[in-house]
Image (tube, rainbow, N blue to C red):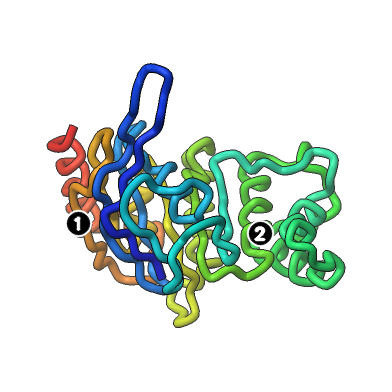
Amino acid sequence: MIVLDGVGMTYRAASGPVEALRSISFRVDGGELVALVGPSGCGKSTLLRIIAGLRPATTGRVAVGGHAVTGPVPAVGMVFQAPILLKWRRIVENVLLPAELAGLDPGAFRGRALELLRLVGLGDFADRLPRELSGGMQQRAALCRALLLDPPLLLMDEPFGALDAMTRDELNLELLRVWGEGSRTRKTIVFVTHSIVEAVFLADRVVVLTPRPGRVAELVPVPLPRPRTVETRASPAFGALALQIHLLLARSA
C-alpha cells in the first residue's frame, strides 16, 4: 500500500536549512497497522503529511497504492490530535463534511454517517453540537468523519494523545474494532504516537525513529495474537516488546 524509498525532508528557515528526515525507507502492506514512535521533533508528523501528499519530500520516492505521490492523495482519511470539529455544525453534519468537500451529495452519505456514529456509540448524539460532547466523544466523531468515504488508508497523528488514560485505552479498543481486527478487509493505518504502550498494543509493526533528523532506527514486528484485549497488556511478551522499543529509543537519543 505504501512505499517509502530514501525519503528526506529539509525545511528552509530564516536561520538556515533544517533537516527533519533523512533516508527513510520502509513499506506498509495493505491491511497493516503500523505505528511510528520517536522523540518530539523527529519528523513523525512530517512523514505522515508526506505520505498524504500534503508536503513534498525533498529527496526520495513515495508511492501509495502503486502510484507515485505527486500531490494530495484522494483515497486517504486523516485524524489529528485535536478533533477539529466545526463548532456551529451538528455532529452528523461534521461527519458529512468530506462528502461536501469532494463535491458529492451529502444526502447520499447521511445513512453511512449515522451508521458510523452508531458503530462508535454516538448514535444518540448525531444532532448534538460539538460543545455538548466530551473530548473522547468528539474524537470518535472525527474518526467517523475520516471513515465516511471509506478510504483504504487512514493516517492518524496522535489522535488520542490529549485524552485521559482511561478514555485513551477505550478508544484504542474502539479503533481496533472499527479497523476490523480479525477481518480480511481491514484498512491500512499509519498511526503516530509518543506512547510505546499504545504502539505495541495497536500495531502489527512499530517503526522506531531517531532524534532529528529522523531516521529508521529499527522496524519492530509485534507478533502478539489478535484480537487484542486489555489482558494483552499484562502478558510477558507485551512487556518485552515495550522494553525493547524503550531501549531502542534510549540508545538512539
* Mark 2 to mark 1 CA distance (whole Å): 34 Å
Q: Residue at x 38, y 49 (%)?
A: 198
Nearest the eye: 24 or 196: 24
Which residue lies under the disc numbered 1? Answer: 236
Q: Is residue 239 left or right of residue 53?
A: left
Query: In the rendered image of this protein, does residue 151 appear above or below residue 85?
Result: below
Tag 1 or tag 2, which sits nearer the N-term? 2
Q: Amino acid at mark 2?
A: Cys
Q: Quadrant of the C terminus?
A: top left
Q: Residue at x 66, y 59 (%)?
A: 144
Helix, strand or loop under label 1:
helix
Which residue lies under the disc numbered 2? Answer: 144
Q: Quadrant of residue 225?
A: bottom left
Q: Quadrant of the N terminus?
A: bottom left
Q: Position of residue 160 (x, y in %)?
A: 51, 44
Q: Is residue 206 left or right of residue 109?
A: left
Q: Position of residue 17 (x, y in %)?
A: 34, 27
Q: Residue at x 54, y 45 (%)?
A: 167
Q: Amino acid at mark 1?
A: Pro
